[in-house]
Image (spheres, rainbow, N blue to C red):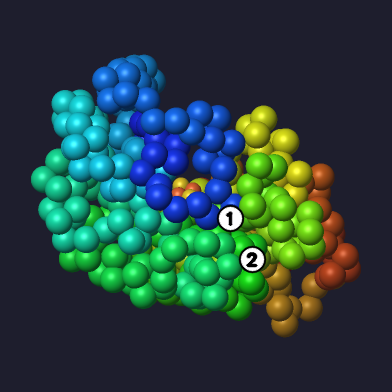
Amino acid sequence: MKTHKNIAVFIPHLGCRKACVFCSQSAITGVARTEPDLQSELVRIRTAIEQAVPTLGGADAEIAFFGGSFTGIGEERMLAFLRCAGEYLGGNIKGIRCSTRPDYINEHICELLAAHGVTAVELGIQSTDDKVLAASGRGHTAEQSRLACELLVRYGFELGGQMMVGMPCADLQSELRTASDIVGFGASTCRIYPMVVFRETPLYRMAVSGEYSPLTNEEAARRAAACARVFIDAGVEILRIGLHASRNLADAPFGANHPAMGELVESEIYYGVIKEKLAGQKVSGTVTIQIPRGELSKCVGQKGACRARLAAETGAEIRFVQTDALQKYDVRIIS
Ligand code: SF4
């Protein structure tokens, strides 16, 4: 199977006229929150692309503008970025993707994106509960997300939905509804971000004052896994769970700051899938479970936690066998 890569170009906070309580784009991407002049930005974009091209190794790729609200950076700048990226389209580089906010999407923007080689748009939906959106100062409503998705699907873009777990005023039920809504909006890909509390954000102050209770890594993994199951069952591809490991993430004082949060969540997904398969079965001695090749560490869990939980709950020894015959997240109980 041919692999797919993103050539990531980060545009931290540029284009964002809002200030979500949890946002610290400079902390997440490690890039300063300033707006450099256009020419130096274009040089940065060219450098990022030209450095990435030799590393593609034959994989198909998209140039991906991530980090801020791409369609809110001003039309002139956005078009300059797109024209610059557009010069590299062709061969392995199949298109351009960007991430933005639901309230920065309209017909005019869709026309511009479509005319300049954009193939996929990822929307920061975060929640479809207006109470949750308001508590985070998102500055848009769930209805705006729905309308933006409808428009993007109508224009033929691959739609990605980004959601968060552990926002202020959110609970598991609102998060599961958000995942279902994103599926219903027509997303073919998604990203799940358990909330991390960075130091210089309003959310940090809310956490210190007790107004907000940060998730533990374990709670974050459980809730993100439950949402992930909604996407998996609907056939929506999960592109990422959790932030990339970084010094900034390691310095984050609260929330889902584990450097391998994605792996924790995937372990939790496998735990749930295996438990469902074992439900109603009488097991004793050793249970052998077939799992997809390459997924052993997730099935075993960090420090063997997933296997130990299954063993404690079933009273059996758990043995995993890898096979090429199963797709990701599928398992089979052998004996
Ligand atoms: S929309 Fe995104 S970039 Fe803008 S303030 Fe919120 S989290 Fe930060």
Position of residue 105 in the picture relative to residue 269 (left or right): left
Foreground residue, 263 or 324?
263
User: How far across and down, in percent of the image, does residue 68 sit?
Assistant: 41, 43
Q: As shown in the figure, which amino acid type bears the numbered disc 1?
A: Val
Q: Which mark is residue 21?
A: 1
Which callout, 2 or 1, points at the residue further toward the start of the chain? 1
Identify the secondary structure beneath mark 1: loop
Q: Residue furthest bottom?
A: 280
Foreground residue, 224 or 297?
224
The residue at 28%/25% (across/down) is 38
User: How far across and down, in percent of the image, does residue 273 sit?
Assistant: 63, 67
How much space separates mark 2 and mark 1, taking CA atoms? 9 Å
| Residue density around tag 2, few if under 14, some if 14–19, many if 20 or more, within 10 Å | many
User: How far across and down, in percent of the image, does residue 149 sit?
Assistant: 30, 66
Position of residue 320 in the picture relative to residue 11 (left or right): right
Res 179 seen here: yes
Q: As shown in the figure, which amino acid type bears the numbered disc 2?
A: Pro
